Structures are given as structure tokens and as C-alpha cells.
Amino acid sequence: MALAAIPLRCRCGRVQGEVGTRGTYARATCYCNDCRAYAQWLGVPGLLDAAGGVDVVAMAPSQLRFTAGVDQVACMSWSERGIHRWYAACCRTPLGNTPRDPSVHYVGLSTACMEGAGAAVDTAFGPPRRCLVSTASATGPVRKRPLGTLWGILRVAFGLVGARLRGRRASPFLDASGHPIRTPEIVRR
Ligand SMILES: [Zn+2]
Ligand SMILES: [Zn+2]
């Protein structure tokens, strides 16, 4: 049976929380240059697969809750218009990526902050590498998954429309007025 919530924990344990499993859009691997550069900027080993992709669970941010270490939650972006990339400043564990537009109810949650849950992650969110994004910029061979990718993208699109229709806004990365809880650090590369 799938757990109703998966524990979230940065590698050093200062940032903790839980991830509800009912607001999942799709699990995806992103091979884009920005995600890869971000993993390299964080400098933590093990974030990239053999072809330079990162594993995320696209989901509703209202499913995410921090229970400890919120003061360590930091944000960067590659540009003034780029997406917000959240991480645990204590040990540079990636947490999740969110759009700049707070009305888009989306977080691409990094599975790196759910490692402690082990196989429960696959049970809750599905196996990895079924929905593959930006494979053109992969750094190694990837087995293309056109149907899994299309299905994942559709699930994200339906999830976002559904969240908008239901007026969902809550996110631990936003304050009550919809502003990010940290000013993103703009990092040039
Ligand atoms: Zn930490
Ligand atoms: Zn990406």
C-alpha cells in the first residue's frame, strides 16, 4: 500500500518535512542544460543520471510541508526570468523548482530530498525515467519513452488546469500574499 506521505529530509537532516502523495502530476527526468548546471552548481554527487538527467516529481506544492529547518531553505535562479530553484543551504540538497508565476500551482520536487524513503518513492510516484524531458540535451544515450513522456506532460497539464479551477495556491515556498519566502539569488554562469 502506498504511504499517504513521504518523509522529506535534506542530506544533513536540518530541513525536514513531508510530501503528500495525492497531488502528484507525474514523475519526470529532465535533461535540460539548466537543470544539469544547477546540479553541478549545488556540487552534491549523485544528482545526475548516466545521461545527465535529474529526477523530479511534478506535483502540487500544497502537498509539501516543512516541519524543521525552514530557515535553511534558500532560492536561486539562473536569471531574472528563470524558474526558482529551491535548496537546503545547510548541505545543498535540492528541494524543488517552482515557476515565477505564483498562480501556476507547480513544483518539480527533487527526489534527492526523499532518498530516505527508499522504494516508497517509486510506489508513491511511479518508477523513474518514464517521462523524459529535453532529451536533445542529454549528455549520453537515453532510451526514448515517447508514450510515457506524452502521458506525463498531459498529466502535468491536466493537474495544472485542475488546480487552477479549484483555486489552489498554497505553497510552502510562498508567503500569504503569494511572494516567494526568499528573494532568489541570481547566479550568473
Ligand atoms: Zn541539510
Ligand atoms: Zn530541466
Image: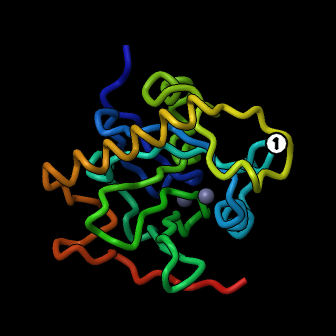
Furthest residue in direction left, as rendered: 166
Place residue 98 in its image quadrant.
bottom left
Where is mark 1, residue-wise? 50
Q: Circle 1 sits in a helix, a strand or a loop, which is it?
A: loop
Q: Is residue 101 above or below residue 30?
A: below
Residue at point 57%, 29% (across, down): 147
The chosen color scheme is rainbow
Left or right position of 25 against 31: left
Left or right position of 153 against 188: left
Instruction: Give the image location of residue 39, x and y in percent.
Output: 69, 61
Residue at point 41%, 66% (across, down): 99
Q: Is residue 25 above or below residue 106?
A: above
Which residue type does callout 1 highlight? Ala
Given residues 133 and 102, the one toward you in this image is 133
Place residue 111 in its image quadrant.
top right
Residue at point 34%, 33% (across, down): 21
> On the rendered image, what quadrant is the N terminus found in?
top left
Instruction: Give the image location of residue 42, x and y in percent.
Output: 67, 66
Left or right position of 161 against 176: right
Using a 10 Å C-alpha cutoff, classify the residue at mark 1 as few (fewer than 14 neighbours), some (14 to 19) or many (20 or more): few
> On the rendered image, what quadrant is the C terminus found in?
bottom right
Furthest residue in direction top, as rendered: 1
Given residues 113 and 60, the one toward you in this image is 60
Q: Is residue 99 above or below residue 162?
A: below
| Mark 1 residue's CB less than 8 Å from ligand 2 | no
Instruction: Give the image location of residue 120, x and y in percent.
Output: 48, 25
Residue at point 47%, 81% (across, down): 184
Instruction: Give the image location of residue 91, x and y in percent.
Output: 61, 62
Give ligand 2's quarter of the image: bottom right
How many numbered callouts? 1
Place residue 38 in its image quadrant.
bottom right
